């Protein structure tokens, strides 16, 4: 495979279990340094795909490349490059947090004289330094999730594969997990997440792949996915002066990329349904400024709700797990 910014290239893979097709002719490129979300209902093939990427099982047909390494030819090489966090804890309750990480450091062949530093750094990264001597069974669910993430990072992998990492977490723990994943992205990790928590995926991920029945339905940037399926983005524009709101609304209504404009009476906030690309968005902002309108803020709203609408329309009749 040619060297590109694609870190994982999935080429026409299928996975059959007797009479069940878990994956069907599935292809996807995952760019380096992204947080890539796999979205789909129960039985979509998300966990099977992650297990193939982790070199734990082999596809029935097709190939998966990590840069220049094909997974089935070099599974041990791939397993050194990836950290896999399954959708179950897999913890040992009779160990302390430190002992738990020491065990996995040994499995990954990390020299014993480096264990103390590696484990200390990981516990600090996942904010569990104060729990280093606590028994695993006494930790909260959110803490156990962060400990499992530290386990997946113990050998400093290039790629993280996380299967439903936010499942069962309370809102605070989900926010903490999201912040941690962004920190890992800043550390140049590529992160692949499976989840059905759609609003969080839209906030967390730069790219998503919608899956159903073992097939890829659509993939790309969050905004691109919603736009390609007939969705639109919503621009939020705030002016400095209330008396210029009507003028701004009329100007926006006359633009081809704007289908609807609304304003909550008594406020300077305008909301516009927008169906163009980023270049068109820049032109709209430039036009507003050229006309002398006092724009205080101009930004697209989060795509979370729209991604959820797209997902529900695609997977109608399926059970979300």
Image (spheres, rainbow, N blue to C red):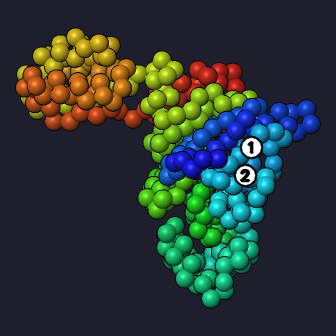
Q: Residues within 10 Å of mark 2 (few under 14, many from 20)?
A: some
**Quarter in which the C terminus is drawn:** top right
| Nearer to us in this view, 303 or 29 | 29
Could you tell me which secondary element the residue under label 2 belongs to?
Answer: strand
Q: Is residue 170 visible?
A: no
Quarter-wise, where is residue 60 in the image? Answer: top right
Q: Which residue is mark 2?
A: 70
* Callout 2 touching callout 1 (CB < 8 Å): yes
Q: Residue at x 23, y 25 (%)?
A: 283
Q: Is residue 188 visible?
A: yes
Quick check: 156 above or below 226?
Answer: below
Quick check: 261 above or below 5?
Answer: above
Percent position of residue 135, x then y = 66, 76
Q: Residue at x 67, y 41 (%)?
A: 10
Q: Which residue is mark 1?
A: 63
Percent position of residue 306, x then y = 47, 27
Percent position of residue 284, x then y = 23, 24
Quick check: 91 above or below 63?
Answer: below
């Amino acid at each position: 495979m040619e060297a590109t910014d694609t870190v994982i290239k999935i080429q026409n893979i299928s996975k059959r279990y007797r009479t069940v097709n878990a994956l069907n002719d599935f292809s996807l490129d995952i760019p380096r340094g992204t947080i890539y979300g796999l979205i789909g209902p129960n039985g979509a093939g998300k966990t099977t795909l992650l297990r193939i990427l982790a070199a734990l099982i082999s596809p029935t047909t097709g190939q998966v490349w990590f840069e220049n390494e094909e997974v089935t030819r070099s599974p041990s090489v791939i397993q050194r490059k990836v950290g896999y966090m399954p959708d179950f804890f897999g913890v040992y309750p009779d160990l302390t947090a430190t002992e738990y990480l020491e065990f996995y450091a040994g499995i990954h062949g990390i020299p014993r004289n480096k264990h103390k530093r590696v484990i200390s750094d990981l516990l600090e990264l996942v904010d569990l330094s104060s729990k280093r001597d606590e028994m695993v069974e006494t930790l909260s669910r959110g803490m156990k999730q962060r400990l499992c993430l530290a386990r997946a990072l113990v050998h400093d992998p290039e790629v993280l594969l996380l299967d439903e990492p936010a499942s069962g977490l309370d809102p605070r723990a989900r926010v903490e997990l999201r912040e941690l994943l962004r920190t890992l992205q800043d550390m140049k990790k590529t992160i692949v997440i499976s989840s059905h928590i759609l609003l969080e995926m839209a906030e967390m991920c730069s790219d998503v792949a919608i899956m159903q029945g073992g097939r890829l339905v659509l993939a790309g940037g969050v905004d691109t996915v919603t736009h390609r399926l007939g969705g639109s983005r919503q621009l939020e524009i705030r002016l400095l002066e209330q008396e210029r709101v009507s003028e701004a609304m009329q100007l926006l209504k006359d633009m081809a990329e704007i289908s609807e404009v609304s304003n909550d009476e008594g406020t300077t906030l305008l909301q516009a349904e927008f169906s163009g690309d980023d270049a068109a968005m820049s032109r709209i902002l430039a036009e507003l400024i050229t006309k002398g309108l006092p724009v205080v803020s101009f930004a697209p709203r989060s795509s979370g709700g729209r991604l959820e609408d797209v997902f529900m329309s695609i997977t109608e009749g399926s059970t979300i797990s």
